[in-house]
C-alpha cells in the first residue's frame, strides 16, 4: 500500500520563487497515495498558474474566499475539516507574519485558522528576509503555537545571495510527512491524534563539538559535525516541542524554529545549560563535550621551539551527569559514542549518569557522517535502530523518548 494512502493533505502555496517546487511536491504526495487539495494565495498564482496544480492533483485549486462556485459557500471550513495535515510550501515571510498574528483575509489564511489538524510550514525567502528580527519573532511564535517548521535550508538563493532561506527539497518535505504519518500509526489519520507527541514541551538540546583554546590560534576540539544534534532538534520541533539548541561551532544552519545559543568551550556550554535547565522539561545532550581542557589558556601565541611540548590538561565538568544528578532534574537523555562493546559500556554509562534513556553509537561510523546506527538503552533493555540518515534516526529517537516521557 502506498505510504500516504487515504491521507488528506492540504498543500498551501504562497507567493515566492520556490512556488514552482510545490508542483513537484504535489506530484510526490500524489504518487505516495495522498489525496492532495491545493490552496494558493493570489500572489502564488503570479508565480505558477493554478492550472498546473489542478492537473497534478486532479482537483480544482482553492484561491478565492468569495468564489461563487465554492460548494455550500463555506469552502474554507470544509477544506479545513477535510484535511489530515496542512502543509504550506513555500511559506512566504508575509504569510508567516499573517499566521503568527492570526490574520484571515484570504482563502489559505482563513482555512489555516479554521483547521484543527496539524499545520506544517516550509519557509522560503531571501536570507535577509529570513534573518530579519520580525521573521524570526514570527517563526518562534508559530513554533510556540504548535506549528511545525521544516527548514529552511541554507545555500545559494534565486536572488544570487547565499544563506539561510531556501525551501527544503520537495523530497525531504514529502519524506517528513510520510515519517510523521508512519509514527502516528499506519491505520490512523493524524486528524484524530493531532496533538504532537511533545506538544509545547520545553526541550533543551546540546549539539556539536566544544573548542578548548590553548592560545589565541590553537585549540583542542573533536570531529563532531553537529549533524545528529541538529537532526534531534528538528525532530523535536516536528514533534511539537519548544526547542532551545545550544551548539558548539559547526557549519550547519540551526532549525528555524529553535531558540539558538552559540557557545565555544565546555565551560560556556555548561553555563548556558545551567541557565536553561530550570525552564526545561527535557534535556537531551548530543554534544561532544571535551572531557579535558588545557590547564592554561595562553594570552599570547605559544612560540615554536625544537623542544618537545608537554600540555597539562584538566578535566571538564560532565554536563549531563551534573544536570541528571541535580535536585529537580528535567527528563534527561544522552548520546554516547563508543568504539567497542557499545551495549555494555553504554549501559554502564546510563546507570552511572542515572539516565532514563541513552543512545549509543559507534564513534568511528557516526562522526561527521550523514548516516548513523543507534542502540537505545532504557530500563526495558536495548532497542537497536538500524542504519539510516540522521534525521530519520532522530525522529525514531524522539518517538521513543516521547513514549518514555509520557509513560505511554
Ligand atoms: C519576483 C518575486 C519573488 C519573490 N520571492 C519571495 C520569496 O521567495 N519569499 C517571500 O517570502 N516573498 C517573496 N516575494 C514577496 C512576496 O511575493 C510578497 O510578500 C507577497 O505579498 C506574498 O504574498 P502571500 O504571502 O499572500 O503569498 C517575492 C516577490 C517577487 C515580486
Image (cartoon, rainbow, N blue to C red):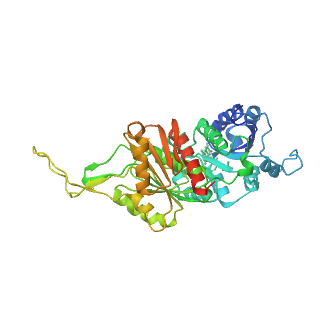
Residue 174 in the image: x percent, y percent?
63, 38
| Labels in figure, total | 0
Q: Which one is nearer the viewer's eye here, 194 or 87?
A: 194
Q: Is residue 9 visible?
A: yes
In this rendering, would 257 be left or right of 276?
Answer: right
Report which quarter residue 177 is drawn in.
top right
Residue 404 at x, y = what percent? Answer: 57, 53
Q: At 23% across and 58% down in the image, what residue appears?
A: 295
Of the pair 33 and 59, the residue shown nearer to us: 33
Quadrant location of the N terminus? Answer: top right
Which residue is more in the foreground, 102 or 82? Answer: 82
Vertical relation: 329 (above or below) 340: below
Q: Where 1 sits versus 200, above or below?
A: above
The part of the image, by quadrant, that contains residue 144 is bottom right
Q: Position of residue 103 (x, y in %)?
A: 71, 59
View extreme (right): residue: 72
> Looking at the picture, how far across and down is residue 239, in whole percent?
60, 51
The residue lying at 52 percent from left, 36 percent from top is 386
Amino acid at each position: 500500500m502506498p505510504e500516504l494512502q487515504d491521507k488528506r493533505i492540504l498543500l498551501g502555496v504562497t507567493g515566492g520563487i520556490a512556488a514552482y517546487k510545490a508542483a513537484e511536491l504535489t506530484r510526490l504526495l500524489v504518487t505516495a497515495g495522498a489525496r492532495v487539495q491545493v490552496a494558493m494565495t493570489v500572489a502564488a498564482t503570479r508565480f505558477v498558474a493554478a492550472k498546473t496544480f489542478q492537473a497534478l492533483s486532479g482537483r480544482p485549486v482553492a484561491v478565492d474566499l468569495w468564489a461563487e462556485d465554492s460548494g455550500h459557500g463555506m469552502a474554507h471550513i470544509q477544506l479545513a475539516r477535510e484535511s489530515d495535515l496542512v502543509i504550506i510550501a513555500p511559506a512566504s515571510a508575509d504569510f508567516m507574519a499573517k499566521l503568527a498574528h492570526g490574520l484571515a483575509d484570504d482563502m489559505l489564511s482563513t482555512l489555516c485558522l479554521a483547521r484543527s489538524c496539524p499545520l506544517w510550514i516550509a519557509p522560503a525567502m531571501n536570507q535577509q528576509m529570513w534573518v530579519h528580527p520580525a521573521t524570526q519573532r514570527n517563526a518562534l511564535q508559530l513554533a510556540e503555537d504548535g506549528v511545525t517548521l521544516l527548514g529552511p535550508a541554507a545555500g545559494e538563493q534565486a536572488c544570487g545571495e547565499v544563506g539561510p532561506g531556501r525551501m527544503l527539497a520537495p523530497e525531504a518535505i514529502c519524506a517528513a510527512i510520510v515519517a510523521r504519518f508512519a509514527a502516528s500509526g499506519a491505520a490512523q489519520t493524524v486528524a484524530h491524534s493531532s496533538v504532537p507527541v511533545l506538544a509545547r514541551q520545553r526541550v533543551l538540546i546540546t549539539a556539536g563539538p566544544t573548542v578548548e583554546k590553548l592560545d589565541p590560534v590553537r585549540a583542542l576540539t573533536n570531529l563532531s559535525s553537529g549533524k545528529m544534534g541538529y537532526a534531534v532538534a528538528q525532530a523535536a520541533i516536528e514533534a511539537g516541542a519548544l526547542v532551545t539548541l545550544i551548539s558548539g561551532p559547526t557549519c550547519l544552519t540551526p532549525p528555524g524554529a529553535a531558540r539558538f545559543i552559540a557557545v565555544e568551550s565546555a565551560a560556556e556550554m555548561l553555563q548556558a545549560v545551567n541557565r536553561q535547565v530550570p525552564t526545561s522539561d527535557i534535556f537531551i545532550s548530543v554534544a561532544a563535550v571535551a572531557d579535558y581542557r588545557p590547564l592554561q589558556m595562553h594570552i599570547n601565541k605559544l612560540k615554536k621551539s625544537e623542544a618537545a611540548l608537554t600540555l597539562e590538561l584538566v578535566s571538564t565538568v560532565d554536563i549531563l551527569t551534573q544536570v541528571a544528578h541535580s535536585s529537580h532534574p528535567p527528563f534527561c537523555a544522552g548520546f554516547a559514542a563508543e568504539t567497542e562493546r557499545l551495549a555494555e559500556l553504554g549501559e554502564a554509562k546510563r546507570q552511572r549518569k542515572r539516565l532514563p534513556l541513552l543512545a549509543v553509537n559507534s564513534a568511528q561510523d557516526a562522526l561527521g557522517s550523514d548516516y548513523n546506527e543507534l542502540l537505545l538503552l532504557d530500563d526495558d533493555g536495548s532497542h537497536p535502530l538500524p542504519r539510516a540518515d540522521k534525521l530519520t534516526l532522530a525522529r525514531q529517537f524522539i518517538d521513543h523518548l516521547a513514549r518514555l516521557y509520557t509513560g505511554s
